[in-house]
Image (cartoon, rainbow, N blue to C red):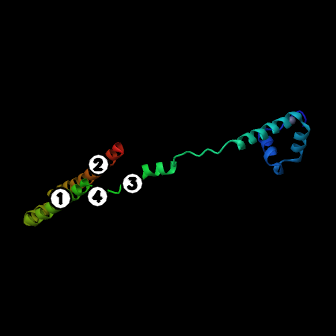
Amino acid sequence: MKNIHVSDVDIQRFAFDQNGCEPKMVEHIRTCEKCQQRVDTYLSLADIIKGQPKVTPDYDLANLVLGKLAPSKKTWTIYNYLIGFIVFLVVGVAILTIGLYQNTISYLLDNAFINQAYCFASAIIFITIILGIDLFKSFNRKLKIVNA
Ligand SMILES: [Zn+2]
């Protein structure tokens, strides 16, 4: 044991908390000059670190970061009203069209091919509107990030 020195981890454990050390290791450190020097080095290093003045920045980092993260209170911008107006317009036109051309539409719905085409076209129009709104909103979000 005399020729095999104790590892750095065990030296640190011995220096700062001897209770968790094995008796063989404690005996080695107490009898080995080289290991005792390493313990003294760690202890003097810890004293130097403890002697350093506590650094407190003159600005509040938490408030600076939170200020950047705070969401804007102005959630209903002119664009949201525009999107609402477009959706209202599309729904209104659809209801008006169905109301005015009720007979024609019921005739078209009787025809199987036209019926399928109508379902397909309305699904495409609906998805396009939803994707357009989402694209518009994400564009505005990115624009806000760039401007911030
Ligand atoms: Zn040793």
**Which residue in the protein does label 1 denote?**
90
Mark seen at residue 32: none
Query: Earlier along the polypeptide chain: callout 4 or callout 1?
Result: 4
For the residue labelled by badge 3, is the local secondary structure a helix, a strand or a loop?
A: loop
Per the model, the C-alpha gap separating discs 2 and 3 is 20 Å
The reply to whether callout 2 and callout 3 are in contact (CB within 8 Å) is no
Query: Earlier along the polypeptide chain: callout 3 or callout 1?
Result: 3
Per the model, the C-alpha gap separating discs 3 and 1 is 31 Å
Tag 2: amino acid: Leu
Query: Earlier along the polypeptide chain: callout 2 or callout 3?
Result: 3
Query: Earlier along the polypeptide chain: callout 4 or callout 3?
Result: 3
* 144 relative to 91 in the view: left or right: right
Per the model, the C-alpha gap separating discs 4 and 2 is 17 Å
Tag 1: amino acid: Val
Mark seen at residue 71: 3
Mark seen at residue 76: 4
